[in-house]
């Protein structure tokens, strides 16, 4: 008997599986360690295999939820997230459509501009805010003043989601057909193009929410008690409770991306022959 040769495809599959396993461990192990520190009422020096099942409790969540500022910070972050999503979509969808239809040569320049918030750290934006703060106190004093800054921070992710969605559809044909049938630009945008960008809009929405739930620097400088700022402040008085809230926020963000992956999966239909064929959404 001769040994069956292992194909290059098998090595490729093993390599992909290995990368997924390593990536999963890179995420799961720190998350598990943080969860154990937050929910297990054991001294850090005593944490080990022998105390793995000792003194687990959800009291840290009860204490955190009972804090006077918890609900206020959560409501504020929710309002800011909703406002950021709406402003992002109102700005990016028409802009991206216009660039694709009228200024295709400017796409590279627009992409470069949207990358800048990712290249320049948030502290750079904060420095600019401090400079103009004395002149726009009427705006900075509002809790919703964080919305435009978060729109800028989310640009590297949201614009690419919209841009990818536009590349996946025949934008020019859809637009010309709608215009020939008498639809105006606004009707074409909201009733023809937007439904075909469902997956891209959902992706942009969830990515924006993730940015809002994770941003701390700008909110701290502007003295806004958002949920991330509340977590940082609460951690100073109750480290375990602060990390428990971080676990909760990380878990919710992960859940958002799982839901995002499910909502943006191509739908499948069963044709008359009985084979599965993908259908674009």
Image (tube, grey):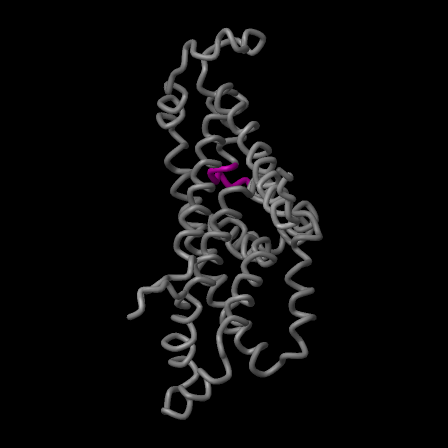
Picture coordinates of residue 7, whole percent (x, y): 64, 48
Q: Residue at x 49, y 43 (%)?
A: 213
Report whether residue 238 is seen. Answer: no
User: Which quarter shows the C terminus?
Assistant: bottom left
Picture coordinates of residue 134, whole percent (x, y): 63, 51
User: Which quarter shows the N terminus?
Assistant: top right
The magenta stretch spans which residues?
Answer: 223-228
Residue 278 on the magenta span? no
- Along the viewing direction, whichever of 109 and 235 lies nearer the viewer: 109
- Along the viewing direction, whichever of 180 and 69 lies nearer the viewer: 180
Picture coordinates of residue 253, whole percent (x, y): 46, 42
Name the residue at the left extreme: 272
Picture coordinates of residue 255, whole percent (x, y): 42, 42
Q: Is residue 165 above or below residue 181?
A: above
- Along the viewing direction, whichever of 146 and 151 lies nearer the viewer: 151
Report whether residue 94 is seen. Answer: yes
81 relative position to 43: left or right: left
Q: Is residue 118 above or below residue 276?
A: above
């Amino acid at each position: 008997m001769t040994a069956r040769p292992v194909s290059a495809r098998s090595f490729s599959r093993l390599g992909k599986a290995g990368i997924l396993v390593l990536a999963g461990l890179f995420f799961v192990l720190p998350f598990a360690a943080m969860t154990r520190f937050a929910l297990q009422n054991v001294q850090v020096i005593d944490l080990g295999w022998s105390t793995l099942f000792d003194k687990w409790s959800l009291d840290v969540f009860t204490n955190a939820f009972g804090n006077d500022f918890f609900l206020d910070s959560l409501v504020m972050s929710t309002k800011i997230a909703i406002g950021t999503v709406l402003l992002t979509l109102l700005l990016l969808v028409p802009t991206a459509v216009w660039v694709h239809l009228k200024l295709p040569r400017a796409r590279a320049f627009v992409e470069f501009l949207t990358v800048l918030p990712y290249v320049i750290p948030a502290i750079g934006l904060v420095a600019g805010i401090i400079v103009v703060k004395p002149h726009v106190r009427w705006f900075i004093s509002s809790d919703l003043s964080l919305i435009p800054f978060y729109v800028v921070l989310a640009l590297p992710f949201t614009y690419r989601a919209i841009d990818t969605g536009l590349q996946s559809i025949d934008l020019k044909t859809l637009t010309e057909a709608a215009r020939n049938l008498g639809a105006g630009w606004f009707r074409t945008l909201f009733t023809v193009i937007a439904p075909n960008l469902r997956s891209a809009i959902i992706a942009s929405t969830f990515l924006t929410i993730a940015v809002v739930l994770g941003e701390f620097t700008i909110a701290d400088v502007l003295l806004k008690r958002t949920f991330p700022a509340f977590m940082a402040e609460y951690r100073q008085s109750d480290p375990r409770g602060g990390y428990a809230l971080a676990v909760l926020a990380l878990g919710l963000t992960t859940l958002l991306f799982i839901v995002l992956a499910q909502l943006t999966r191509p739908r499948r239909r069963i044709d008359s022959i009985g084979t599965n064929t993908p259908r674009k959404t």
